[in-house]
Image: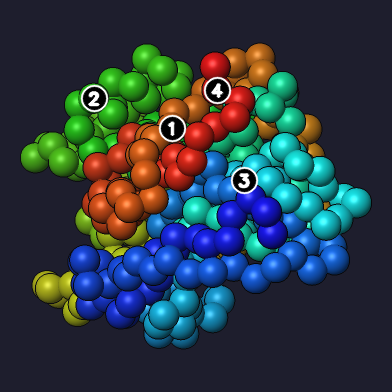
Amino acid sequence: MTTSATTTQITLAARPVGEPDDSTFGTVTTDLPELAEGQVLLRTVYLSLDPYMRGRMSAAKSYAAPWEVGQVMQGATVCEVVESRSDRRKVGDLVLAYAGWQTYAVADARHMRSLDPAAAPVSTALGVLGMPGFTAYAGLLQIGRPQPGETVAVAAATGPVGSAVGQIAKLKGARAVGIAGGEEKCRALIEEFGFDAAVDHRSPTFREDLEAATPDGIDVYFENVGGPVFDAVSRRLNKFARIPVCGLVANYNATSAPQGPDQLPGFMGRVLSLSLTIRGFIQDEFVAEHEADFVREMSAWVADGSVRYREHVVDGLDNAPEAFRGMLSGRNFGKTVVRVGADPTSA
């Protein structure tokens, strides 16, 4: 190996109880193995931070195995090939890989996808043209199935999933209502992303504002948050409403059950009387059948400006833990990525 023999890694040092703190993460520098035939040495350019990572830090049973204590934090990355022993990749190639929270990695050249910086900024492979964009596309169109004239509401609406949901809903002829935290985000939903209405869930009049923004009720609610937002939305649902459940970020750091009366019986009554459809999903279940359509359609929408996106870029791998905490509490605006190393496509 001629380019670099070491990597700096951020590891899961301890399983968090509640919000991850400094003791949750460790930093180590370690030697990398020599390249074997078919492998490449990757330099991490961008690292994706996503809410699902909080679940993988817990030992609780879920749709995927938890990360082990001491393991490198995992995640999608945009990387540059800096050394290759594979005919599939040459030095200088930019790829979507899963190198995780580290500066360099050795990987099998088969387990990555080529990126074309001429088609779109390479960081979009972690956001609007990557897993978050596909999550919005598949969840909304395959579960929500919005019809022209219907009302689609989405929580965490300025995030990479939520902003795409609202814009795709508009492209399909529906009315888009975004729920976000703070005046700045709500203003951007209207002025930047083209939503029909925006509601601030931090406002003391949130419930009244939501009612005013959805005079004809809600036909599709794309769930990213849960908690009090869902409670308010559930009272605006129309008969036959569809609820794709993508995430429940309001509960990810919870250490106990919510206080107050059990509201489940009342909600289940609405499920029955309104013939609601509630469907949890993980985006990869739709990849085989719908990813090609997503790549074609979303690439075209981004290219012609029909779908816009924002990125929240944090510099430096050492700042990834704090950026992760901020993302879980809503301090980010747009898709959170960490710029780990220099972007060779930047001027």
Where residue 68 appears, as percent x and y from the top left, is 46, 82
Q: Residue at x 55, y 22 (%)?
A: 346
Q: Amino acid at mark 2?
A: Glu
| Residue that carries the numbered disc 4 in the rendered image | 346
Q: Amino acid at mark 4?
A: Ser
Label 1 – label 4 distance at C-alpha: 15 Å
| Residue that carries the numbered disc 2 in the rendered image | 184
Q: Does the image show residue 245? A: no
Q: Single out the residue that lies furthest toward the right.
A: 87
Is tag 1's residue or tag 4's residue first in the polypeptide sequence? 1
- Marks 1, 3: nearer the viewer: 3
Looking at the image, residue 177 sits to the left or right of residue 264; the answer is right
Is tag 4's residue or tag 3's residue first in the polypeptide sequence? 3
Q: Does the image show residue 32? A: yes
- Label 4 neighbourhood size at 10 Å, few (<14), some (14-19), many (20+)? few
Q: Quadrant of the N terminus?
A: bottom right
Q: How is the image coloured?
A: rainbow
- Element under label 1? strand
Q: Amino acid at mark 3?
A: Cys
Is tag 1's residue or tag 3's residue first in the polypeptide sequence? 3
| Residue that carries the numbered disc 1 in the rendered image | 311
Nearer the observer, 107 or 114: 107
- Label 3 neighbourhood size at 10 Å, few (<14), some (14-19), many (20+)? many
Q: Amino acid at mark 1?
A: Glu
Q: Residue at x 37, y 15 (%)?
A: 191
Label 3 – label 2 distance at C-alpha: 33 Å
